[in-house]
Amino acid sequence: MEAAATGELLREARERHGLSREALAIRAGTSKQFVSEIESGQDSPTVDALCELLQLMGEDLVLGMEKRITGIDLTLNQANLNLSPPSSLQSRWRR
């Protein structure tokens, strides 16, 4: 997650809950400056720290994964990886 996206998430949640940066900082036991730096993308908290900040506002951070479609034939890659070094060289130069 990019720092700017992280800051935007935090700012949107904070504003949705009607909190000032100072109010969130007090809840988190940190400084208003730290909250400001996260929101502006100057600092990037750990995932755990971001989760904690969001939880203090009654929010949960939900992360997920999706298989990426690369357009690469992975079976061909695997077949090439299984070739011996001499066979691999011969295969490359025959194309």
Image (tube, rainbow, N blue to C red):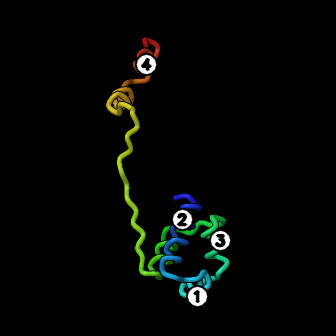
**Neighbour tally class for label 4: few under 14, some 14-19, many 20 plus, Cα within 10 Å:** few
Note whether 65 is above or below 30 in the view shown: above
Give the total of numbered labels.
4
**Neighbour tally class for label 3: few under 14, some 14-19, many 20 plus, Cα within 10 Å:** some
Sequence-first disc among 3 and 2: 2
Q: Contact, CB < 8 Å: mark 2 with mark 4?
A: no
Q: How far apart are marks 2 and 1 (CA)?
A: 20 Å
The residue drawn where x is 43% and y is 15% is 90
Q: How far apart are marks 3 and 4 (CA)?
A: 55 Å
Q: How far apart are marks 1 and 4 (CA)?
A: 65 Å
Judged by depth in the image, the label closer to the viewer, 3 or 4, is: 3
Sequence-first disc among 3 and 4: 3
Sequence-first disc among 2 and 1: 2
Q: How far apart are marks 3 and 2 (CA)?
A: 11 Å
Return the residue at label 1. 26
Sequence-first disc among 2 and 4: 2
Q: Distance between the residues labelled 2 and 4?
A: 48 Å
Residue type marked 2: Thr
Residue type marked 4: Pro
**Neighbour tally class for label 2: few under 14, some 14-19, many 20 plus, Cα within 10 Å:** many
**Which mark is on residue 37?**
3
The residue drawn where x is 58% and y is 86% is 23
Q: Is mark 2 on a helix, strand or loop?
A: helix
Q: Is mark 4 on a helix, strand or loop?
A: helix
Return the residue at label 2. 6
Q: Contact, CB < 8 Å: mark 3 with mark 1?
A: no
